[in-house]
Image (spheres, coloured by chain):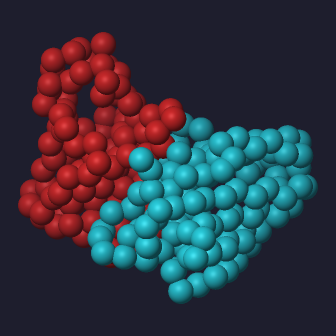
Chain colours: A cyan, B red
Amino acid sequence: SQQGEEDPQALSIQEGENATMNCSYKTSINNLQWYRQNSGRGLVHLILIRSNEREKHSGRLRVTLDTSKKSSSLLITASRAADTASYFCATALASGSRLTFGEGTQLTVNP
Amino acid sequence: DAGITQSPRHKVTETGTPVTLRCHQTENHRYMYWYRQDPGHGLRLIHYSYGVKDTDKGEVSDGYSVSRSKTEDFLLTLESATSSQTSVYFCAIRGAVNEKLFFGSGTQLSVL
């Protein structure tokens, strides 16, 4: 099974609202990353949070990490129609060079 | 954008034929990865490389082989294509462990 699992699978909101996506994982990690994928395109890195960090910001993005609960959340504030995409979390284990992805959350922002 | 190119972008082939996908990078990154993306499964790691001639299996490596004879090229071969290998294949690179990945644009492969 996947190391990272996103919740919800799909989210539909109106422009200007905030969007929150969650990611849970099973084993200890070195870092957790969030990626975005527009339809028909490759994934693009959004933000990386290390296991010793609890919160990180980048523009309208806010990521939190709770290692005790093995979970992370991605908050997109003041969403725009252009934020419509799939969002994936990916975990990097402490020991290896692999990055394991979840199944993604499909975000639709309606104008 | 990171200099990473996948070829071909689209391919249709028949069951039982060998297929090779190419990933080319101009970033001199050490690590290269092949993922496949299927509905309901997200991205799954097929094989990866941590240097020239150094490769390792991912979680869905059966039916696939890889080669890396130069830093810039990472080839994925489907030895005898099956319909279950119809998928979108993504190559990714990164310079160091535990850093971010840069993805190519993907190859849509259809096995009929």
Q: Position of residue B37 (x, y in %)?
A: 43, 39
Q: Residue A20, can we see it?
A: yes
Q: Position of residue A102 (x, y in %)?
A: 51, 51
Q: In the image, B51: left or right of A78?
A: left
Looking at the image, which residue is at 44% across and 50% down? A2
- The image quadrant of residue B2 is bottom left
Looking at the image, which residue is at 51% across and 35% down? B40
Going by the picture, which residue comes out furthest to the bottom?
Answer: A52
Q: In the image, A110: left or right of B9?
A: right
The vertical placement of B105 against A16, above or below, is: above
Q: Residue A58, can we see it?
A: no
- The image quadrant of residue A46 is bottom right
Given residues B26 and B85, the one toward you in this image is B85
Given residues B28 and B49, the one toward you in this image is B49
Point out the image quarter for the C terminus of chain A.
Answer: top right
Going by the picture, which residue comes out furthest to the front?
Answer: A68
Q: In the image, B69: left or right of B99?
A: left
